[in-house]
Amino acid sequence: METAGKIETPMKDKIVEAIPEINLITDADLREKTVRVWEDAIASGGWTWEAIEKMPFSVHVENCNITFIEHVRTVCQMCVAVHDVLKNAYGTRTQLNKDYLIAGALLADVGKLIEYEETNGEITKAGRGQHLRHPFIGVAMSYVHDIPAEVQHIIATHSKEGEMMTRSNESVIFHHADFIDFDLVSKKRPF
């Protein structure tokens, strides 16, 4: 179904409902492309929405009780908060693209939908996950959907793979927000 240049699908509706931060992307084209990457990753990984809602955010955290969607949303919200604090504090001296930051935050882990698989109710690294980690997969999927290189950079550099590169301002924000969430959850600290 197409309405005024926008493609409407049942999966798109579920994605936007579950991840309302997508609507914070003011550039309509980037917002649509971001949703398409999610749709593609879900289809390519063979996921049902019900399985995604139960998926832990990391297979590297034993008994992880934080879901993939909770992690994506939380880290995105932290990025928006950091952006807003920096803009309020430094005004135009801060060079940040909020749309790129949000899209990068929402797409950085989308490759996990290909890296991971569900087998008999257990989430593990898929066959493809043995060869490629989610940052590589996320960049490839985003490239196919013509996501700007600045957003692909956030995806590519957000994890340990980014240690060899100079991160953009947006990537620095996402990288630290992502690891705040990961470190707190993986260490089982009460918070």
Image: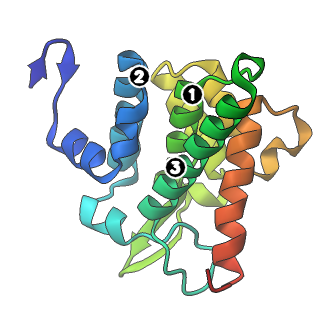
Mark 1 is surrounded, within 10 Å at the Cα level, by few (under 14), some (14 to 19) or many (20 or more) other residues, namely some
Residue occupying the point 79% across, 46% down: 161
- State the residue position of label 3: 77
In the rendered view, does 51 fall on the left or right side of 122?
A: left
89 left or right of 109 in image: right
Q: Amino acid at mark 2?
A: Thr
Disc 1 target residue: 98
Quadrant of the rendered image containing residue 62: bottom right
Alpha carbon distance from label 1 to label 2: 9 Å
Above or below residue 5? Residue 19 is below
Q: Is residue 107 left or right of residue 46?
A: right
Q: CA distance from mark 2 to mark 3?
A: 15 Å
The residue to which callout 2 is attached is: 26
For the question of whether residue 14 can be seen, the reply is: yes
Earlier in the chain: of badge 1 and badge 2, it is 2
Mark-to-mark CA distance, 1 and 3 = 12 Å
Colouring scheme, one of rainbow, by chain, secondary structure, one colour: rainbow
Q: Quadrant of the C terminus?
A: bottom right
